[in-house]
Amino acid sequence: MLSFNDAGLAHLFIAATSCAPEARSRWLKLVAERLEAAAAPRTPAPATLRQRHHRARRQRGEIVLRVHVNETDLAAALAGSGALPAVSNDDRRRLEEAVSELLRDWCAAWR
């Protein structure tokens, strides 16, 4: 839906009078399509989403750490300790969740 203030509507009417009467309807439809397309909500850029997630984590007091470890050894250790089911050893997201949960539990134990 388009919304104009008085000045914007006046400018639109003045511009419409410069078109031939038989082409005016088509011109107004074209203008409306362009304005609606420009006003349509856009998907945020990936960098914008990363920044939003970063700020939300910072606000919650969370950080992201890089840990260099052999993936196979980590999966075997987590599966051996019962923190990770053996069927999900090859899923990195589950590995991250299991390590995060272990670290959260460890931090809670030291409070």
Image: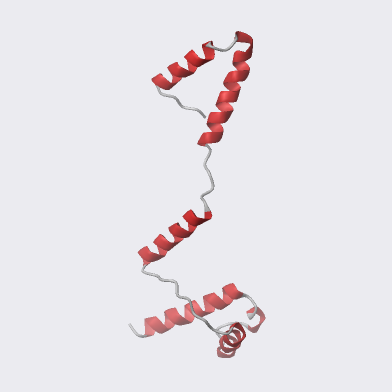
Q: Determine the residue located farthest toward the left in the rendered image.
A: 111
- Position above or below: 13 against 58: above
Side (left or right) of 82 relative to 13 = right
What sort of colour scheme is used for the picture? Answer: secondary structure
Q: Which of the image's four quarters has the C terminus?
A: bottom left
Q: Position of residue 75 (x, y in %)?
A: 60, 84
Residue at 41 percent across and 71 percent down: it is 63
Residue at 53 percent across and 44 percent down: it is 42
Q: Position of residue 29 (x, y in %)?
A: 60, 22
Q: Position of residue 28 (x, y in %)?
A: 57, 20
The residue lying toward the viewer, choosing from 67 and 36, is 67
Q: Determine the residue located farthest toward the top in the rendered image.
A: 21
- Position above or below: 42 against 22: below
Side (left or right) of 78 relative to 101 = right
Q: How many numbered marks are there?
A: 0
Q: Quadrant of residue 96?
A: bottom right
Q: Position of residue 26 (x, y in %)?
A: 63, 18
- Position above or below: 39 against 58: above
